[in-house]
Image: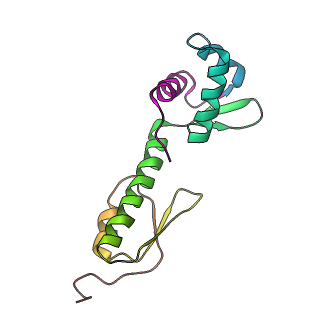
Amino acid sequence: MRWPKKREFITYYLLFRLFKGKKVNIGEIIGVLSLFMSRKTAFNIVKRLRHLGLLKRTNKVDYEVTDLQEYLDRIATTYLMQRLVKRAKSSGLKVEVGFESNGKVSIKGLPSEILEAISKIPFMKLKILEKQNSSKNNH
């Protein structure tokens, strides 16, 4: 998942502050954005924001702006899990990570000490697939 570019993020932030928690019509979005950019650019940015997960389409013409914290939690979880897998592989562990549609992360193959540390991260929603022995018991 790529990070939003500056113009995309500033546009998202504008929409977030204006329409947070409301369903908003594409016409209203384009009306606001056309003050700052062409209509074509505004439509393209809306499309990119949708692909990034910053806008959710509720029907053909209505959108909801994703909560900023929810979005940051999701991309932080994805990034940290990628880093965890790379770090575990370099340590010789075979780790499997999966992302479920409900936002939970399933992890298999990590020692219990690491799982315990990860479970303390506030935005990390874990689903542990199999219990692991502590690394002290593996020697």
Q: Is residue 11 magenta?
A: yes
Q: How is the image coloured?
A: rainbow
Residue 28: x and y in percent read 67, 18
Q: Residue lying farthest top?
A: 35
Residue 93: x and y in percent read 35, 77
Q: Residue at the location (48% across, 43% down)?
A: 2
In the image, which residues are magenta?
1-23
In the rendering, at what x and y percent does residue 56 appear? 64, 38
- Relative vertical location of residue 99 with respect to residue 25 in this rendering, above or below: below
Residue at 45%, 59% (x, y): give it.
Answer: 125
Quadrant (top left/top right/bottom left/bottom right) for the C terminus: bottom left
**Relative image position of residue 131 (x, y in whole percent):** 40, 81
Residue 29 in view here: no
**Res. 37 visible in picture:** yes
Residue 118 sits above or below residue 62 on the image: below
Judged from this view, the residue extending furthest toward the right is: 60
Predominant secondary structure, magenta span: helix
Q: Which residue is painted at 55% across and 28% down in the image?
A: 20
Asked if the magenta segment contains residue 84, the reply would be no
The residue depicted at 48 percent of the width and 26 percent of the height is 13
Of residues 79 and 71, which is closer to you in this image?
Answer: 79
